[in-house]
């Protein structure tokens, strides 16, 4: 399924559209284009398509990203990127990894700046109206706040070394930490056993 395919007859396999708030782009036909990157039952609240703003990591433009679709769900931000002529890849940014979210708007282009402990992402959100873009960024801030509160209410992360190792592997898979950082932290955790 391509970034801009339009097969309205195919059912959604993962996404759940029965939720509020939602912006005007959240429809079955639009969400189908990113559905394969979502978890079963994941609720899609906001959807945006880039309008040429591109995608950045730590201020560096990822030059071969020709188009992107961004879904803001109940769990995370999911970005589907078209790279080159035929390549597709996804990027997930989990709310509990986000430290800040900013919105910048120009005459035409809008960009979310999402900062995590290890990276800063610049995500083009294209043709969203100003109020829709603001609602999207406020929703993300609320989810980040909720994720931080639930983490502090439960006393932080689990003390179980296996839980810590699994979380480290998830962070590595998400691109939040490098292989070297994973190995260093893994060694520290194994030394505590």
Image (cartoon, rainbow, N blue to C red):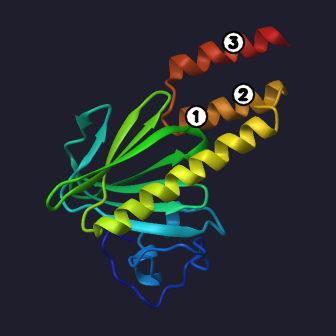
User: How far apart, in angstroms, are the residues tagged by discs 2 and 3?
Assistant: 10 Å
Q: Residue furthest bottom?
A: 9
Residue 71 lies, in percent from the top left, at 45, 62
Which mark is in front, 1 or 3?
1
Q: Describe the element under mark 3 as helix, strand or loop.
A: helix
Number of disc labels: 3
Residues packed near mark 1 inside 10 Å, few (<14), some (14 to 19) or many (20 plus)? some
> CA–CA distance between discs 1 and 3?
16 Å
In this figure, which residue is indicated by the disc labeled 2? 165
Q: Residue at x 60, y 71 (%)?
A: 14
Q: Which residue is mark 1?
A: 171
Question: What's the residue at 43%, 64% (across, down)?
Answer: 135
- Residue drawn at (39%, 79%) of the image: 24
Q: Which residue is mark 3?
A: 187
Where on the picture, by quarter, is residue 25? Answer: bottom left
SS at circle 2: helix
Image height of 141 relative to 187, above or below: below
Q: Is residue 61 above or below residue 112?
A: above
For the residues labelled 2 and 1, the Cα–Cα distance comes to: 10 Å
Q: Is residue 70 left or right of residue 193?
A: left
User: Does residue 145 appear to the left or right of 116 in the view shown?
Assistant: right
| Sequence-earlier tag: 2 or 3 | 2
Q: Is residue 95 visible?
A: yes
Lower sequence index among marks 2 and 1: 2
Residue 70 appears in the figure: no
Q: Quadrant of the N terminus?
A: bottom left
State which quadrant residue 149 falls in: top right
Mark 1 or mark 3, earlier in chain:
1
Query: Decide: marks 1, 3 in contact (CB < 8 A)?
Result: no
């Amino acid at each position: 399924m391509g970034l801009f395919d339009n097969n309205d007859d195919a059912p959604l396999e993962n996404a759940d559209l029965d939720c509020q708030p939602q912006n005007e782009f959240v429809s079955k036909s639009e969400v189908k284009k990113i559905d394969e990157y979502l978890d079963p039952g994941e609720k899609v609240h906001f959807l945006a398509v880039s309008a040429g703003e591109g995608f950045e990591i730590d201020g560096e433009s990822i030059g071969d990203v020709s188009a992107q679709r961004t879904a803001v769900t109940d769990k995370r931000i999911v970005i589907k990127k078209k790279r080159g002529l035929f390549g597709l890849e996804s990027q997930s940014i989990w709310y509990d990894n986000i430290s800040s979210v900013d919105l910048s708007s120009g005459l035409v282009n809008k960009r979310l700046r999402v900062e995590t402990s290890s990276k800063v992402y610049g995500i083009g959100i294209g043709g969203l109206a100003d109020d829709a873009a603001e609602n999207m960024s406020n929703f993300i801030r609320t989810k980040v706040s909720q994720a931080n509160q639930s983490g502090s209410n439960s006393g932080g992360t689990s003390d179980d070394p296996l839980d810590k190792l699994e979380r480290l592997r998830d962070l590595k898979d998400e691109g939040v930490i490098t292989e070297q950082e994973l190995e260093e932290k893994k060694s520290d955790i194994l030394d505590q056993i």
